[in-house]
């Protein structure tokens, strides 16, 4: 099997996408933790009590931190995918198929995995890519 070495462009793109994912999660977590009142109406619409906002923010913060550390980035991507899947499922439950929150959650998970796929041969193999 040939040794995989990502191009400089792939590495920078991967880094940029990873930063985008982490920043998005940090901002969302920050709002959930420090300004949960801003999300109260939206959370009520999907059936979550406002008191859960800081907990959800903490989970997002954990996902962002685990994803930001190169050695644990794949575990972080799994956590992000799980969290995004829960968000997608929540919106399906209330009849919002294809809603912007669902699309954002899907995109966030997909971008996290794309960033890893661009730089990590093990992730490529795990996702079925054969060179």
Image (cartoon, grey):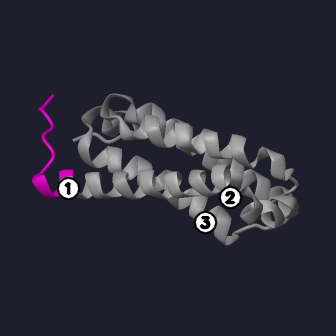
**Label pair 2/3, CB-CB below 8 angstroms:** no
State the CA–CA distance, disc 2 to disc 3: 24 Å
Disc number lying in front (1 or 2): 2
The x, y position of residue 31, in whole percent, is 62, 57
Q: Which residues are magenta?
A: 1-11
Report the residue marked by disc 2: 35
Mark 2 neighbour density, 10 Å: few (under 14) some (14–19) many (20 or more): few
Residue 12 is marked as 1
Q: Residue at x 12, y 32 (%)?
A: 3
Report the residue marked by disc 3: 103
- In the image, is 35 to the left or to the right of 75? right
Q: Residue at x 34, y 50 (%)?
A: 115
Is residue 99 located in the magenta-colored stretch of the structure?
no
Vertical arrangement, residue 13 with respect to residue 129, above or below: below
- In the image, is 9 to the left or to the right of 39? left
Kind of element beneath mark 1: helix
Residue at the limit of the structure toward the front, as seen here: 34
């Amino acid at each position: 099997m040939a040794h995989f070495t990502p191009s400089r462009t792939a590495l920078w793109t991967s880094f940029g996408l990873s930063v985008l994912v982490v920043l998005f999660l940090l901002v969302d977590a920050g709002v959930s933790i420090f300004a949960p009142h801003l999300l109260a109406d939206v959370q009520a619409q999907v059936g979550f009590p406002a008191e859960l906002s800081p907990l959800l923010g903490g989970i997002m913060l954990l996902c962002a931190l685990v994803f930001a550390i190169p050695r644990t980035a794949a575990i972080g991507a799994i956590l992000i995918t799980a969290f995004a899947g829960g968000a997608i499922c929540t919106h399906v439950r209330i009849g919002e198929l294809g809603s912007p929150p669902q699309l954002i959650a899907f995109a966030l998970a997909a971008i996290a995995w794309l960033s890893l796929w661009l730089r990590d041969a093990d992730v490529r193999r795990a996702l079925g890519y054969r060179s």
